[in-house]
Image (cartoon, rainbow, N blue to C red):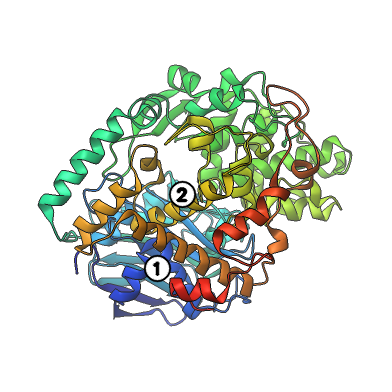
Amino acid sequence: MHGYRGKVVRINLTDLSYKLENLNHDEAMKFIGGRGFGSKIMFDEVDPNIDAFDPANKIIIATGPMTGTPTPSGGRYMVVTKSPLTGTIASSNSGGYWGAEMKFAGYDAMIIEGKAAKPTSIFIEDDKIEFRDASGLWGKTTIDTTNELMKDAPAKAKVLCIGPAGENLSKIAAVMNDLNRAAGRSGVGAVVGSKNLKAIVIKGSTKPTVADPDALKEVVKRGRAQIKENGVTGAGLPTYGTSVLVNIINEAGVFPTNNFQQTYFDKAEEISGETLAEKFLIKRESCFACPIACGRYTKADDIETGGPEYESVWAFSAACGVSDMKAAIKANFWANEMGMDTISAGVTVSTAMELYEKGFIKDDELNGLGLKFGDGDSMVEWIKKLGRREGELASKMAEGSYRLAESYGHPELSMSVKKQELPAYDPRGIQGQGLQYATSNRGGCHVRGYLISPEILGLPEKLDRTELKGKPEWVKIFQDLTAFIDSCGMCLFTSFALTADDYADMFTAVTGKKHTAADILQAGDRIWNLERIWNLKAGIDPAQDKLPRRLMEEAIPTGPSKGQRSGLAELLPLYYKERGWDEKGIPTADKLKALGVPA
């Protein structure tokens, strides 16, 4: 069984037991691995209407067939569960080295069930699995947790853990691995915390086999050359990290500022990738088998930390009206320490700032802290507090921006889709990305179909970002391709340089199962429709395929994109048609039958 290891481990936290199961190879090939295979397990085993914190909810950690192989960036894994933030099926992606180590230990997936009676950690070394009391780790930050666990772990073991945010069931909590890498979005860390699971330490000793080593060597060589020659993956990302986008997005006038009240930040240069590299960068960091090395390791005053990435820089700067890079670095550090999604954390604070600006949050709720746009020091303190739910307002923030704004009677001030906070691109000036936001199966998300690539960066070809024509077709292709990439175990950033044909060739060489570009896009389509059906069963109505009211009804007020409006109302029915769904956004029986997706 090439590419796959052939084993799934089912872990029951209630009675601290586990059993090994054979991988269903046919299902794995059909849904690829990672996101797709994990979602199929959720579809088969978890009631979509269950509360996310019910012990009967499950956590599936899944690798893909490329995870742990020499394919470029082949080290990714997915955390799949029901999201406490959105109610959708959550599948959150992370890099680093933990996913590859899970594959080396011999597992394609872990199915985590039940709830431990007390805080628990799991130690895995190949086929040896041990449960340990983690009561002494409960309350510790992610770095302290990792350092403590490594004292009793095998050399070169990898640690996955949650921080105080997950323990305190913050709906924006992340799962952290390798200190600074995160399965960040949708609140997956809170589900881990609800099960009293603090960490999983893993060490493996064998690598997966591949079907055709010579063919794989050639296609990997070709792929790495394309990555090196590409302007984004070969120059921009290695040199400046993902924050190379700050000036590019700002100059287009789609850089959300002050909670999306503006779209141009006049101090963007101060928080740009160029400034980060010049003044704060200590070293570059890379994930397993990655030739890009876009990760940053930075220092601000006495704090050293992994990151921040573009989305984190934005969330802790322009989104909150802050132009202090040191504050952004410190906020990123504390979000990682608390184990929180940096996008949701920053946008939630920016929502609180607007609520305060408009008089809905009162001074007597602040406990002496500031909450004004531009106040970087206070922003950092709020990140610390909301991670531990310190105080009533911080506890409200820990629920995410939608529930925070709703508690004050103004949910429209939450810049979110399906209750998940939007990232760093204003959709009024990037029409395809706006359609992708609205239709994403996990709520507000930029990496379920990164239309920034063609609409801003011109890859694989330059599209007019203001044009509506053709965008539904582009969105579907990008969503389907992304679903495959998330499932195979590679990083989405490789898609700046690689084509669907390249991924098909790599998949064929690894697994021995011939796939074409059409085959992998069909697999992505299958995964997308499976997620859609699960969400529909969970009560996520197609009426939620929308943007926040501000972004639907108001034109961009100032800057280079002044006057631009969302075309979502016109695009959405065309997108449904392109997907083969009915006019209400429901997959048809014929569509599901053609893909082999259960209704």
Indicate the quadrant where residue 157 lies.
bottom left
Q: Name the residue under label 1.
A: 37
Answer above or below: position of 250 versus 44: above
Quarter where residue 211 is shown: bottom left
Residue 148 locus on image (x, y percent):
38, 52
User: Which of the marked residues, 1 or 2, is nearer the chain's N terminus?
Assistant: 1
Which sits in the foreground, 108 or 514? 514
- Tell me what residue is drawn at x 54 percent, y 24 percent: 248
Mark 2: which amino acid? Ala
Please state the horizontal and vertical placement of residue 518, each as a whole percent of the image.
Answer: 36, 57
Q: Residue 159: give x, y in percent of width and height.
A: 36, 54
Residue 390: tell me if it is visible: no
Whole-percent x and y of residue 101?
A: 27, 56
Which quadrant is the N terminus positioned in? Answer: bottom left
Residue, x 49% and y 68% (percent of image)? 119
Foreground residue among 127 and 468:
468
Name the disc covering residue 182, or none: 2
**Disc 1 or disc 2, which is closer to the eye?**
1
Amino acid type at image mark 1? Phe
- The residue sitting at 31% across, 77% down in the picture is 24
Q: Quadrant of residue 41?
A: bottom left
Q: Is mark 2 on a helix, strand or loop?
A: strand
Is residue 379 shown above or below 131? above
Label 1: how many Cα within 10 Å (few below 14, some 14–19, many 20+): many
Q: Which mark is residue 463?
A: none
Q: Dot 2: within a 10 Å radius of its alpha carbon, few (fewer than 14), some, or many (20 or more) residues?
A: many
